[in-house]
Amino acid sequence: VMNVEFKKKSDLHLLRKAWHMLGVLLFFSIWNLFPFPKSTIIFIVLWLLFVPGDIARLKYPRYNKIFNTLFKSILRSSELNRLAGTTYLFTSVIFISLLFSHAIVSLSLLFLAFADPLASFVGIKWGTRKIFGHKSYQGFLAAFAVCTLITFIFLTYFNVDAPILLIAILAGLCGALAELIPLGQMDDNFTMPILSSICLYFLFIFFNIQL
């Protein structure tokens, strides 16, 4: 399978962004429809249905070729011989669901569902000033705006007795930095939910938010 047939990170790749958004919203729905630990068990089952196959394809070229052909519309060229972003996503969702509160996981998933693809879209379309690699100031600001708005709506919905606007701005900064900061060669589908959850955890403690 030739790499040129597949989208690169610098491409808009709208179908992949839609797939990402809907996939993460599915996790969000499972997390909110089923109580813990049933929701996490569902995540683990989904992990077992996808991840072993993703790992196996790297060892078996024929299977890898079939896999790449089937998922050509959503795969990037960088994933042809590496684990897919979905594997990192599954793993991070299980990880945060085991460690953090219901509200923190919910917010982190919403950040990942909306801020990540929108920051990428804005960065590719209008990202003239780069910060880290392909990450731009414009993409960072888009992620910040989206995460701030999501947090403001979320906390308002639950009628939190705290300075909601200030918390929303700080949470927006958490989400935007989690989307921006590169941790070595780690996939941001893995790092963003974890970094967002850690930051939100301390933010919730500081403002004594209990949801």
Image: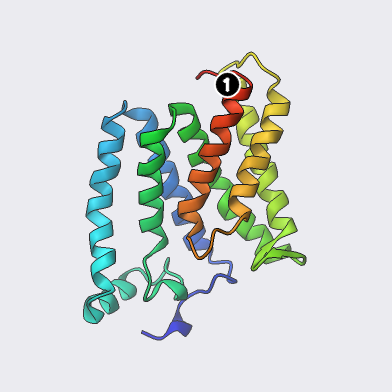
Residue placed most toward the observer, 192 or 13: 192
Residue lying furthest top: 161
Front residue (pair 130, 77): 130
Quadrant position of residue 75: bottom left
106 left or right of 119 in image: left
Which residue is rendered at x = 60% and y = 71% of the image? 10
Q: Position of residue 88 (x, y in %)?
A: 40, 56
Q: Residues within 10 Å of mark 1 (few under 14, many from 20)?
A: few
Q: Is residue 185 left or right of residue 58?
A: right
Question: Which residue occupies 35% across, 68% down?
Answer: 71
The residue located at (54%, 58%) in the rendering is: 183
Q: Position of residue 113 (x, y in %)?
A: 51, 46
Amino acid beneath label 1: Tyr
**Which quarter of the figure is the N terminus placed in?**
bottom left
Q: Residue 192 appears at what percent x and percent y?
A: 52, 49
Along the horizontal axis of the image, is 140 left or right of 89?
A: right
Q: Is residue 3 above or below residue 21?
A: below
Q: Is residue 159 above or below residue 135?
A: above
- Residue sitting at x 36%, y 66%: 83
Q: Which residue is mark 1?
A: 157
**How many numbered discs sit on the rendered protein?**
1
As helix, strand or loop, the secondary structure at mark 1 comes to helix
Q: Residue furthest right?
A: 129
Q: Position of residue 105 (x, y in %)?
A: 46, 35
Pick whichever, 12 or 197, lies toward us.
197
Which corner quadrant of the image does residue 117 belong to? bottom right
Q: How is the image coloured?
A: rainbow
- As drawn, is 115 to the left or to the right of 55? right
